[in-house]
Image (spheres, helix red, strand yellow):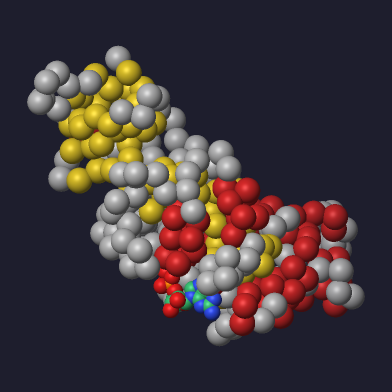
Amino acid sequence: MMQGQIIEGRGGLYTVRDAAGIDHVLRAKKKFRRQHMTPLVGDRVDFTPGEGDEHGWLEEILPRSSQCLRPPVANITLLVIVAAAAPAPDWLLIDKLLLGARMQGMRAVLVMNKCDLGEEAARQARRDYAGAELPVLCVSAGTGAGVEQLRAQMQGEIACFAGQSGVGKSTLLNALLDLHLQTGEISRIERGKHTTRHAQLIEAGGLRVMDTPGFSLLEFDQVMDPVELMDYYPEFQPYQGCCRFQPCYHGSEPGCAVIQAAREGRISPARLERYHELLEKTRQLWRERYD
Ligand code: GDP
Ligand code: ZN
């Protein structure tokens, strides 16, 4: 039995890369279907290699550190949330992605791309996310500015890029991977054009990237008790237990220390406003959870 990681899955065949970097084509054992388990790209697995031209067998899926619903991929450790300096970023989408990442135990960074068009959006992001423990990188895939800082953030991680279309994710990925292009490695990424139709785990220049189709919006299972939403907002933590009512959702309750902190500018009022939108959404999903 050997161990490896699924880097691609198509038509019931899984390509698994072993520790020595050798790829094996495998079929999943029937027991997975019985167990309603689907092997995902990113899964670490035990397998029996095939002999000669025959495919081998995927025997066991090891525990996942994270899992996305759409696209279905496993074990991403770093979510690179990409936004652009112009036109104005969709901040609510950024907060949703950040929440999803944190619910899955992924680290997250915010890349403000197209900083060559202006740095105001990056400054605003730094103000808004100062308490949220979200690193903000000012990057230009076009000029290359900040790309090395992003590369440093990605060391040792399985990174996935997410964000609105048009913000520069493909351009950024090409800038990152082209710099350390090794022969044969990313033959499927055409320069400047992204052709991925299915998820694959790409390794190039010491970086590992989960490349996903459409690849703009990761979706996670976000059903949770609304009272837990605040746990994903590190900037609220200093005010834990300081509100008049307990529990306090920091929604519209009188005597709320979080709302007061936002009024006084100790918490970003914009972040709190978007928290209220996500709180409403979470309450709705929670009410509908058995439907
Ligand atoms: P994606 O949809 O997120 O993958 O975005 P693309 O990578 O396709 O980029 C969308 C457009 O933004 C393209 O025309 C890129 O040339 C342009 N673009 C990407 N990065 C930058 C940048 O750093 N600065 C500027 N000015 N334009 C960029
Ligand atoms: Zn409160």
Observer-nearest of 268 and 236: 268
The picture places residue 280, in percent across and down from the top left corner, at 58, 71
Observer-nearest of 200 and 264: 200
Q: Is residue 242 left or right of residue 158?
A: right
The picture places residue 235, in percent across and down from the top left corner, at 78, 59
Across the whole image, how many numbered discs are drawn on residues? Answer: 0
Would you identify the image quadrant in which residue 108 lies? bottom right
Residue at (86, 74) in percent of width and height: 265
Observer-nearest of 131 and 136: 136
> Split into 4 quadrants, where in the image is the C terminus?
bottom left
* Observer able to see residue 198: yes
Q: Is residue 19 above or below residue 77?
A: above
Residue at (23, 37) in percent of width and height: 14
Direction bottom: furthest residue: 87
* Observer able to see residue 104: no
The picture places residue 177, in percent across and down from the top left corner, at 45, 53
Q: Is residue 169 above or below residue 180?
A: below
Residue at (20, 32) in percent of width and height: 25
Would you identify the image quadrant in which residue 245 lies? bottom right
Q: Is residue 237 above or below residue 64?
A: below
> Split into 4 quadrants, where in the image is the N terminus?
top left
Observer-nearest of 129 and 227: 129
Q: Is residue 275 left or right of residue 205?
A: right
Direction top: furthest residue: 1
